[in-house]
Amino acid sequence: MCVRSAMNDGCARRILDLSEVTLVDLGVIRFLIDCEDEGIELVQCPPYVREWMLRERAEPVELEP
């Protein structure tokens, strides 16, 4: 099952627990930013992931050629 479809099951409060996350890439960072933008609460988010998300939000969006 896709993570996104599992989170769209109509729950009133959506929480994504990141306590077991140890390694992410840019695609995951962008996914997590989208989750927050959609009102999903990220809990137990590793500090380096949170920092990367903040930096990615601050960067201007670059379109791929």
Image (cartoon, helix red, strand yellow):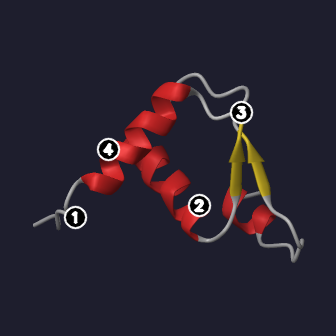
- Numbered circle sitting on residue 55: 4
Compared to residue 22, the image places residue 64 above or below, namely below
Q: Earlier in the sequence, mark 1 or mark 3?
A: 3
Q: Which residue is mark 2?
A: 36
Give the percent coordinates (x, y) of residue 38. Answer: 61, 71
Marks 2 and 1 in Cβ contact (< 8 Å): no
Q: Tell me whether circle 3 and circle 2 mark residues in contact (CB < 8 Å).
A: no
Query: How many residues crowd mark 3 within 10 Å: few (<14), some (14–19), many (20+)?
Result: few
- The one of 61 and 50 positioned closer to us in this rendering: 50
Circle 3 SS class: loop
Is 63 placed above or below 42 here? below
Q: Amino acid at mark 3?
A: Gln
Sequence-wise, the earlier of marks 2 and 1 is 2
Q: Position of residue 13 (x, y in %)?
A: 85, 66
State how far apart marks 1 and 4 are (Cα): 12 Å
- Residue 31 lies, with reference to residue 13, above or below; the image says above
Q: How far, Cα to Cα, is label 2 from label 1?
A: 17 Å
Residue 44: which numbered mark, if any?
3
Three-letter code for the amino acid on which mark 4 is drawn: Arg
The residue wearing badge 1 is 61
Q: Identity of the amino acid at label 1?
A: Val
- Name which quarter of the figure residue 7 lies in: bottom right
Q: Secondary structure at mark 2?
A: helix
Label located before the other in sequence (4 or 3): 3
Residue pictured at 72% horizontal, 26% vertical: 20
- When asked about the image quadrant of residue 64, the answer is bottom left
User: Residue placed farthest to the right in the image?
Assistant: 11
- Between 6 and 57, the one lying in front of the other is 57
Question: From the viewer's perspective, is 11 left or right of 33?
Answer: right
